[in-house]
């Protein structure tokens, strides 16, 4: 039975930062958006969003799409031919959570690397590039980096290692793509420059509907040639949208107003990890750098399913990541009072073990 306080505050949803809803200010921006037919390139708000994002990263162009899965899959199709190979970490979203799109959309295979929480090295890339003159092997045509790494607990990449990977790609005629679903979390946490990323990557996918709080949408950034081709691929995937300015306005508002506040989510994630560290139902916790907290359940106390059910009974929604792992994700829709309540509830649950 939920306490009165739980009922008053409603369910605290930590399953993902995709569960956020637009703020009144964001809704107002959406209501006031100027729109046109984006398939004809005539939606002024979509064009403003694309230009704003491209300029932020110092890249030539951008393409607004419905999801990060779409922008990633478009990028893979851009950089590969059927039968080619994509190099990425075994924890990569493009491999695990995009419906087999690498195979079904691009006809490519995958070389999986064993990184550290999803972060691999330039030497690992170099060691796994196939000999293009050997007809038995697929051509290694692109490398994909995910930053932050979702299944790595929001782990961030160091810029120096990405620079080394870029050099390997250039020396081996390979494209370098960034799955930046939570890139702004990494930029804020590591105090990195968006324009530095624009210099490193051939294409960048950024998501507007996670920590930034927009209800929908992602952007693919690249040079003009890439984005012209990407627009054709988006059309073939059924991704052309008409008066998309209404939702693009939310993404533009998010980029202009919700980046710096990500620090709050990061601070809360670290506070949350400190509480979990002393909980009997927690065996271990991944290092916390950004807004994601992943911990391993102490199954001697209870199973993962029992813990998630127990959390829900106490007004907390969480999600399993498999292998006895549970994920909490902090986001802008969690109020100060809800966060304080969350910490107190976790203490209560711990005392009842």
Image (cartoon, rainbow, N blue to C red):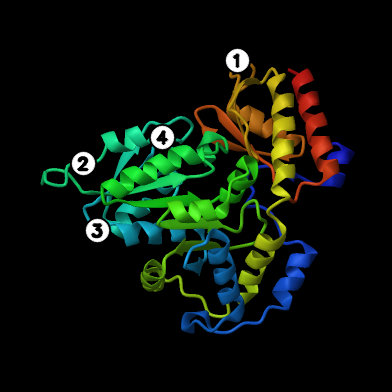
Q: Name the residue beneath numbered marker 4.
A: 120
Measure how far apart labels 3 and 1 are at the Cα level. 49 Å
Q: Nearer the viewer, mark 3 or mark 1?
A: 3
Measured as percent of width and height from the top left, residue 51 is found at: 56, 71
Measure how far apart labels 1 and 2 are at the Cα level. 45 Å
Of labels 3 and 2, earlier in sequence is 3
Of labels 4 and 3, earlier in sequence is 3
Point out which mark residue 130 bears: 2
Point out which mark residue 300 bears: 1
Measured as percent of width and height from the top left, residue 147 is found at: 51, 44
Crowding near the residue tagged with mark 2, few <14, some 14–19, many ≥20 C-alpha atoms within 10 Å: some
**Left or right placement of residue 31 versus residue 221 in this view:** right
Crowding near the residue tagged with mark 4, few <14, some 14–19, many ≥20 C-alpha atoms within 10 Å: many
Measure how far apart labels 4 and 1 are at the Cα level. 33 Å
Seen in the picture, residue 197 relative to 323 is either above or below; the reply is below
Measure how far apart labels 4 and 2 are at the Cα level. 17 Å
- Secondary element at tag 4: loop
- Secondary element at tag 1: loop
Circles 3 and 1: CB atoms closer than 8 Å: no
Residue at image x 73%, y 17%?
353
- Nearest the eye: 157 or 241: 157
Crowding near the residue tagged with mark 1, few <14, some 14–19, many ≥20 C-alpha atoms within 10 Å: few
Circles 4 and 2: CB atoms closer than 8 Å: no
């Amino acid at each position: 039975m939920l306490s009165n306080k739980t009922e008053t505050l409603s369910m605290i949803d930590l399953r993902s930062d995709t569960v956020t809803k637009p703020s009144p200010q964001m809704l107002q921006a959406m209501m006031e958006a100027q729109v046109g037919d984006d398939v004809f390139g005539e939606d002024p708000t979509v064009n403003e969003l694309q230009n704003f994002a491209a300029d932020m990263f110092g890249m030539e162009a951008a393409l607004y799409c419905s999801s990060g899965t779409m922008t990633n899959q478009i990028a893979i199709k851009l950089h590969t031919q059927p039968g080619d190979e994509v190099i990425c970490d075994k924890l990569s979203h493009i491999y695990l959570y995009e419906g087999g799109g690498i195979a079904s959309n691009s006809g490519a295979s995958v070389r999986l690397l064993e990184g550290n929480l999803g972060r691999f090295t330039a030497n690992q890339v170099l060691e796994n590039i196939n000999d293009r003159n050997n007809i038995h092997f697929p051509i290694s045509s692109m490398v994909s980096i995910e930053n932050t790494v979702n299944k790595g607990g929001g782990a961030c990449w160091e810029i120096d290692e990405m620079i080394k990977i870029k050099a390997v790609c250039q020396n081996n005629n390979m494209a370098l793509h960034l799955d930046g679903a939570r890139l702004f979390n990494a930029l804020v946490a590591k105090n990195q420059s968006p324009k530095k990323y624009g210099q490193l990557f051939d294409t960048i996918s950024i998501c507007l509907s996670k920590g930034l709080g927009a209800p929908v949408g992602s952007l693919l950034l690249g040079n003009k040639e890439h984005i012209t081709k990407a627009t054709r691929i988006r059309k073939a995937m059924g991704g052309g949208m008409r008066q998309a300015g209404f939702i693009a306005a939310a993404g533009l508002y998010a980029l202009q107003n919700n980046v710096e506040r990500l620090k709050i989510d990061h601070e809360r994630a670290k506070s949350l990890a400190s509480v979990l560290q002393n909980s009997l139902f927690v065996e271990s916790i991944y290092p916390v750098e950004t807004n994601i907290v992943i911990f391993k359940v102490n199954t001697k106390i209870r199973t993962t399913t029992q813990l998630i059910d127990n959390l829900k009974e106490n007004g907390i929604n969480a999600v399993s990541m498999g292998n006895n792992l549970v994920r909490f994700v902090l986001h802008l829709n969690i109020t100060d009072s809800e966060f304080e309540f969350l910490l107190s509830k976790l203490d209560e649950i711990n005392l009842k073990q």
